[in-house]
Image (cartoon, rainbow, N blue to C red):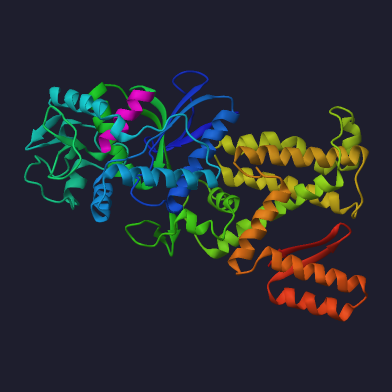
Amino acid sequence: MTLTVYNTLTKKKEAFQPLEPGKVRLYVCGVTVYDLCHVGHARSAIVFDVIYRYLKYRGYDVTYVRNFTDIDDKIIKRANEEGTDYRTIADRYIAAFYEDMDALDVLRPDLEPLATENISQMIEIIRRLEEKGIAYQAGSDVYFSVEKFPEYGKLSGRSLDDMMAGARVEVDPNKKNPLDFVLWKGSKPGEPAWDSPWGPGRPGWHIECSAMGSRFLGPTFDLHGGGKDLIFPHHENEIAQSEAAFGVPFVRYWIHNGFVNINNEKMSKSLGNFFTIRDILKSVHPETLRLFVISKHYRSPVDFSDEALAEAERALERLYATLEEVEKRVPDAPEEGSVHEKALMAQDKELFEKIQSLPDQFREAMDNDFNTAQAIGHLFEVQRALQRFLDSFGRKKLKGPAAALARMGAETVKGHAGVLGLLTRPPEAFFRELRRLKVREKGLSEAQVEELIEKRNQARKAKDFEEADRIRDQLTDMGVQLEDTPEGTRWKIR
């Protein structure tokens, strides 16, 4: 099977062939650290985390770089509002970013450079462009001349004429062309500044990724990712300045994730229709949010709603419930190779075949432009077959070939889900975390619920069924659902 990716540059799916066999160089645009991250940021981070995980699962040696923009107009504005410096603001929100990403189980990239640590590399690229006559100084600023780069617009599919006709670019008397973009900004009073051949100032936004990408991955690398909103102008400008400076293709495959929408509008800070990750995680389990994000193909938009999150939560509960049941009913893992394949097939041919075919089906789905939605569908096919198999034995403990088959199914599902960053917790821990969230959301305490359940159990032992039923009704009114099992009373929040 060949991995194919949709390349925004060519507007089609292509067989993925890295520059160096067996090695992948991946760059993803990070966040501008002036505020807390919202769910739109979570989608991009999770999408590329899954791509990173899958490339490693496929056996590639991956070098993953994701930057931080730690100097920017918005950061300076926030610092001025708070009467502090840009570094304080940037460090605060870098720390907050890590808290959010760790909560979502997003793996740390191999390298996470700061823009301010790479200014000398940016200056060198700008100097090259100026020497080639592609960049020009105007006052204390330096601009890229888009007319000097004939392929400008090849990523977004826009022509210069069309861009000029529809341009709503703020008039800048220093620009030779309204579409020219800034590479270096001369410093204003009170702003952070770095020395340069053009006077004190700071880099423009677009030059950052060209400098960090080329420094850590080379002038040409394999994959560059980000949200669709970055295609133009950010990534378009990255291509122009990088290829003009180095004279070689900048990136071979461009990957862009779709938006998170609310009421058919893109979620963003500028529109004011966003939810921060940490606000969402006060009532939504991190794996629920993760499953919600990857239940749709990464290039498709996803509609954020309570209903969609609830659906993802129910689906995740089904997966974990099946794993938990296998743990309880197959207490000891059978020795590897101790049960013959024919014996497993004799137990449940359909389940055995689904388990055996899952690795190929999973890989086929993911090889098709990282189709997580299809891959997740295959996981649920095995889970449903496994749950039917467990149900066929009632509540009995499983032994021999039946136990081996159940364990094989659970481990196969869990192993492949792990490539997506799902089912990473013991089931008991997941349900405990989920219950804690629900209890907090309803303004209850676990101790309060446990105390009422204990009182009900004592009433049942004393055969005071009227009191037991009254307590059960009280718990029901509180939103607590009870399940009496041979192992004791279990509960969850409806």
In percent of width and height, residue 92 lies at: 38, 46
- Residue drawn at (46%, 18%) of the image: 20
Outermost residue on the top side: it is 20
Instruction: Identify the image quadrant of the C terminus.
Output: bottom right
**234 or 429, which lies in front?**
429
Residue 200 sits in which quadrant? top left
**206 or 254, which lies in front?**
206
- Residue 152 within the segment the image draws in magenta: no
Q: Is residue 21 in sight in this rendering?
A: yes
In percent of width and height, residue 451 lies at: 76, 68
Q: Is residue 390 left or right of residue 22?
A: right
Q: Is residue 405 left or right of residue 286?
A: right
Instruction: Identify the image quadrant of the N terminus.
Output: top right
In percent of width and height, residue 212 lies at: 33, 29
Q: Is residue 3 above or below residue 46?
A: above
In percent of width and height, residue 184 lies at: 18, 35
- Residue drawn at (55%, 53%) of the image: 289
- Per the picture, the main secondary structure of the magenta-coloured stretch is helix
**468 or 281, which lies in front?**
468
Q: Is residue 347 left or right of residue 282?
A: right
- Residue drawn at (87%, 34%) of the image: 334
Q: Which residues are magenta?
A: 206-216
Q: Is residue 257 in sight in this rendering?
A: no
Q: Is residue 168 above or below residue 366?
A: below
- Count of numbered circles on the image: 0
Residue 335 sits in which quadrant? top right
Residue 442 sits in which quadrant? bottom right
